[in-house]
Amino acid sequence: MKRFLAVLLALAMVFALAACGAPNNNAAPNGGNNNNAAPEKESKYGGTFVAAVATSPGCLFYPYQYASVSTYVYPAVETLRLRNPQTGKYEPNLCESWETDLENHTLTMKIRKGVKFHDGSDLNAEVVKWNFEKIMEYGNGSVIQSPTNIEVLDEYTLKVTFPNFDLNQESFTYSVLIYSKKAFEEHGLDWCINNCVGTGPFVLKENVPDSHLLFERFDNYWKKDAEGNQLPYLDAYKIQVIPDASAQMTAFSNNEIHRFPCSDMQISESMYKLGYKNKAQIGEANSAIVYGVYVNNTKEGDPWSNPLVRQALLLHGIDWKAVAFVAGGNTAFEIMTPLIETGDGYDASLMDASKYDVAKAKEMLKEAGYENGFKTKILKLDYGTKAATEIQSQLKTNFNIDAEIVNLVNGDDRRFDGVNEGIYLNYGYTTADFARHLRNMFSPTGTYKNVHKYSDEYVTMLQQMKDAKTIEEKCDLIKKLSYKLMVEECLFRQMYAVPNNIFIQDYVHESGLERSVDGITPETTWLDAAYRK
Amino acid sequence: MNNTSVSNTYDKKLARRERVRKFLRTMFGRKVVIAAAVMLFIFIFIAVFASVLTPYDPNITSPYQAFEAPSSAHWLGCDEFGRDVLTRLFYGARVSLIVGVLAVIIACVIGVFLGLCAAYFGGVVDVIIMRCSEALMSIPRIMVSIALIVIIGSSITDLAIILAIPTIPGYIRMIRGQALSLKNSDYVKAAEMQGANSLYVMLTQILPNAISPIIVMMTQQVGTTILMESGLSYVGIGIKIPIASWGTMISNGKNYLITQPMLAIIPGICVALLVICLNVLGDGVRDAMDPRLRGEA
Amino acid sequence: MGKYIIKRILQMLVVVILVAVVTFFLTDMLPSDPVYLIGGDELTTEEYDYIYHQLGLDKPLAERFVIWARNALHGDFGRSYTYHKDVWELISARIPVTLYLSILSLIISVPLGVLFGMITALKRGTKTDSIITLLANVCSCLPQFWIGICLLVVFGLKLRLLPSVGFHWPGEVGIVQHIKELIMPLICLSLGGVASFTRQTRSSMLEVIRQDFVRTAHSKGIKERFVTFRHIMRNGLIPIITILGNRLAYMIGGSMFVENVFSIPGMGTLMVKSVSCSDIPTIQALVLLTTMVSCMAYLLTDILYVIVDPRISLTSDSKK
C-alpha cells in the first residue's frame, strides 16, 4: 500500500513538474509599445535600470586586469573614443580629436576640456598619461601596443609614440578606460580593485561582491542630449549578479531586471515562447560569442608538439559542427575566421583547409606514431563544459584518445602556463582586427607566449607585417600569417559561434546616440514612466 | 560425558539457527519489507549487469539526437548530448550505489565503534574522541570535500571515502548519546556483574538497543551522500566527466528544469526510490532486532 | 554544571587550535601559487620574489602559522586573494544574512518536524502515518537547488507572486517585501530539515513507546496524554537533540545552493569560491569561525542532554 502510494505520489510530482515545463503562452510581456512612439514633452528622467550578469566581477581596475572589466564599470568609467560598429569609424568621446602620423608612428590626442571625475579632479593629458603608464606597469602594455614614449605637449594634448609602423594605428588606444589618478593616489591599489572612479554618467555607490553593483546619477556629467538636457536620465543603474539562467528568466518576466544576455539556448528558446524577442543586433560585435581552441605545443615529447597531430585532430579529426550544435543548438555554427569582416585581410579560404575526415585524421595520426591513441587533457572554463564533453567523446570513440577534462577556475589560472599539456577551450575573436590579435595574442610577446612555441618563419613574418608600409603588403602578410597560425602550425582554431541573445524590456529606450563598444550607452537610456521606481 | 558436550554444542547451534530464523521471520513479516528488499535487489542487479542490459554506451555522445523524446529505441529519451537516459541510469546506479552505500558503511562502522568506546569507557577516551569529532565536524562539509578532492582526486572510491569523512562525527555523537543513557540501565549492569568483558557488553547489550536511530541515520545518509555528490559536480568538481552517476545527472539536468524537466526528475526519482527502499529495510531490521518484537522478552 | 562548562570551554580552545593548525597545513597542500593569485600573471623574477617575501612565504610553515595566529587574535585575518579585501570585512558583511536565514529555518523546521514526528508515531499504521512518512521520505531526497528552481518557476515565473532575486533587510524595502523575498529560500532550507526531524522523531518515539516504563505508567492508570508528553518526550528527545546540534553547527555552510539559485550573497558562496580559488586567508578565517560556532552548538546540546535525561551524567565516569 505504501509502495503504491509512493509510486502514485512520484508520478503526481512528475506530472506537476512537467506541467511547469510547458510554457505559459498567455503571459505576454508587459510594457509599452515600440520605441518610435515617443511621447513629446514627457520627462524622460527618473527610475532605476537593472542589468543582469551571470558572474561576479573580479576586478574593477582596468590597468590591473583588463579582461572583462568593461562589462562592469561602463556606467562609471568612459573610454577615450567610441567606435561605430556599423560604419567602423571612430568617434570622439573623452578624446575630442586625434591625428595619426604613420611615418613617425605617433598618435596625437586632444583631450576634452571641462570634464571632471566623480571625485572632483580634472581630466587632462597628465591623467591620461598616468593611465597608460599604469597599464604598462602591470604588464598589460600589449593592450595599448606598448608605446615607447608618452609625451604631454600641453595641458590637454598628448603624444604617444609606438614602436613599429602599423597601418591600424588609428585604432590604438581607443578603448582604454580612463580612471581618476587622484583616487588611486589617495586609496591605493586594493581599494581601486573594488571601486571605480571615472568620468561616466553614474557614480559607484555600492559594490557587494557576488551580489550587485549599484551606481547613482552623477550630476556633473559632461554630456548633454540633443536638446541640451543634462544626461543621464536614470536616477540609478544597477548591475545585478544572477548566476542561475532560470532565475534570470524569472526575474526578467517579473520585471525585476531590464536587460540580460542569455547564453543558454534552452532558456532563450523558453523566452521566445514567452513572446520576448532577441534584441542583439546582428552584425555587431556583441551579436555572437565565438569560442576557440588553443593548443599547448611547448612540451617536448608531448603528442601535441607534433604539428601532424595538431593538424590531424583540429582540422580533420573533430566534427566541429557537432560541437557547435551541442554547445549552442540550432543557431550555433562552425567558424574558422573572425566573425565580422572589415576587409582586414584575413583569408576566407581558411575554411577550405578544414574538412571533417576521420579516415584522413587516422592516417595522419598513424604517420605521427599515435595509432593507438594517447592520454591528454582538455582544459576549460565553466562555460566550456558541453563543448569539452563532446570533444572528449569524439576523441575517445574515433582515435582512442583519453582526454581528461580539467576545470579551470579563471582564465588566468597558472596551471595553463605550459605545465599542463593539452588543449584549452576559451573565447575566440569576433572582430576582424586580426592584425591586432596576431600581435597581442599570437606572438612571442603576446598573451599566449607560455603556451605556444612559434616557428622562426612565423616570427619573421610577424615582424614584417608590423613593418609593412602599404595596405596591400599588410593584408597579404596577414593572410599568410593566419594561414600559418591556423593551418600549418595549427596552434589555434576558432571552434564555433553562438549568436548572442540579449533580452531587453520593451519599455527601455535609448536616444540613439553613438553606441559604445558593448552596445550599451547608459547615459542615454530611459524608462517609460510606468516603470520608474 | 562426551554426549553432553556434543549435545551442548548442538544445542548452541540450534539456538543460533532458531534466533536467525526468528530474526528473518520478524523482518520479512511485513509485505512492504519484502517489496523493498526485492527493489534493492533489482537495483543491485541493474548496477552489476548494466553492460548486458543495454546496447548503448553511456558515454558516447550523439549530438543530433539531443533531447529526443522517449521512443522504442530510447525508452526514456536522450539527454543533452544525445546519450540514452536509461543506459546512463543503469550505469549510474553502479556509481551511485557504490558511492552512497560505501560511504555510509565506512562512516557507520568507524563512527559507531568510536562512539561506543567514548560512551562506555568515558574519561579521557571520551574527551579525546569527542573533541576530535567536534573538530572534524566544525569544518564546513563542502570545504572539506572540495579541498580533499583537489588534493586526493575524484575516482569513485576516493569520493566514497571523502564523502564519508565529514559524516563520521554524526554517527559518533548519535551512538554516544544513546549509549550514555543506556549505560546505567539494568541489563547492562547485570551483564557486567556476570563478568562479561567490555567488548561483549558493548556489542551485545548496548548496541542492539542503541542502533535504531543509527539505522534511520544510515538510510537517510545514503540519499544525502548521493545529493552531496550531485552538489559537488554542480560546483564543477565531482565525478569526472563523462562518467554517469545519478548525482551528476541531477546536477546537469538542473539547467533544463524548465524545458526538459525529465532529465533531472528521473534520476531524482531513482534516488528517492533507493532511499525509501533502504528506509523500509532499515525499519525492518530495527524491528527484527528489538527483542520484544521477536517475541523473546 | 558551572565547572563543567568551564572545562568544556577550555577543551573548545584546544579544538580550535587543533583545527587551525590542521587547516593551515592542509591548505598549504592546495596546488595554486598565491604569488600569482595576488600579483597577476605577468611577474618578473624580482617581482615574484618581492611578493613572495611580502606574503612571508619564505619562512618555515610553523613560523607562518604563529604569525597568522597572532594576527588573528587581533582580528586581522589578512587580505583575500580573490576579493582583494580585508577578510574580516568580507565575512562580517555576509554572516548576518546567512545566520538569519539559518536560524529562521531552524525555528520553522524543528517544531514542525517534531510535531509531525509525534503525530506519525502516535498514529502508527494509520493512513496519516503512511502519507506523512512518505512525504518526509520524498522531501529528504530532493536536492535543495531542485526545490529552489521549481519554486522559482512556479511562484516567480508562472504566478508572478514572489520576487526571485536578492535579499534586503526590512529597513531597506519594508517588511512586506522582505517577507516575500524570504519565503522561497526558507522553504528550500527548511523542507529537508522538517523531513529529517519528522523521521527521527517518529523513530525515537516508537522506540520509547514500546519500553516498559510506559507500560508501567499506563497500568498505573495515568491519563494517556500525560504519559505521552512527559515520559515519551523526555526519552525520545535525545537523538533529536543530536540532530539539532548537527544542524546548528552546519548553519553557516549549508545554504550554498539556495544562495546560488536566489542570488543571495551569503557564506555558502564565499566558502565554495574560496576553496576553488585557493584563497587561503579566507579559508582559514572561515574554518576558524565555523569551528567556534560548532563547538558552542555541541556544548549546548550536551547540556540539553543532561537537562532532558537526568540519567546521563555530564562527567561520564569511567566504567568502574
Image (spheres, coloured by chain):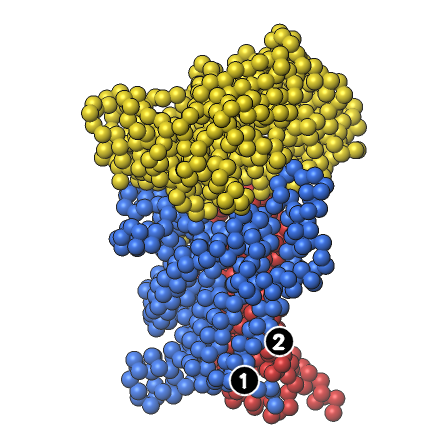
Task: Place residue C209 in its image quadrant.
Answer: bottom left
Q: Colour of chain C?
A: blue
Report if residue C113 is visible in the image: no
Question: Is B67 above or below relative to C120?
Answer: above
Foreground pick, C101 / A170:
A170
* Chain to which the residue tagged by mark 1 belongs: C
Label 2 sits on what residue type? Answer: Ile
Q: Residue at x 46, y 47 (%)?
A: A209
In the figure, is residue B172 to the left or right of A482?
left
Which residue, as the protein is rendered here, is positioned at the far front? Answer: A154
Report if residue C115 is visible in the image: yes
Quadrant (top left, top right, bottom left, bottom right) of the C terminus of chain A: top left
Q: Residue at x 29, y 84 (%)?
A: C223
Question: Which residue is under mark 1?
Answer: C315
Q: Which chain is yellow?
A: A
Q: Position of residue C26 (x, y in %)?
A: 65, 58
Residue B128: mark in rendering: 2
Task: Place residue A412 in its image quadrant.
Answer: top right
Q: Position of residue A227 (x, y in %)?
A: 27, 22
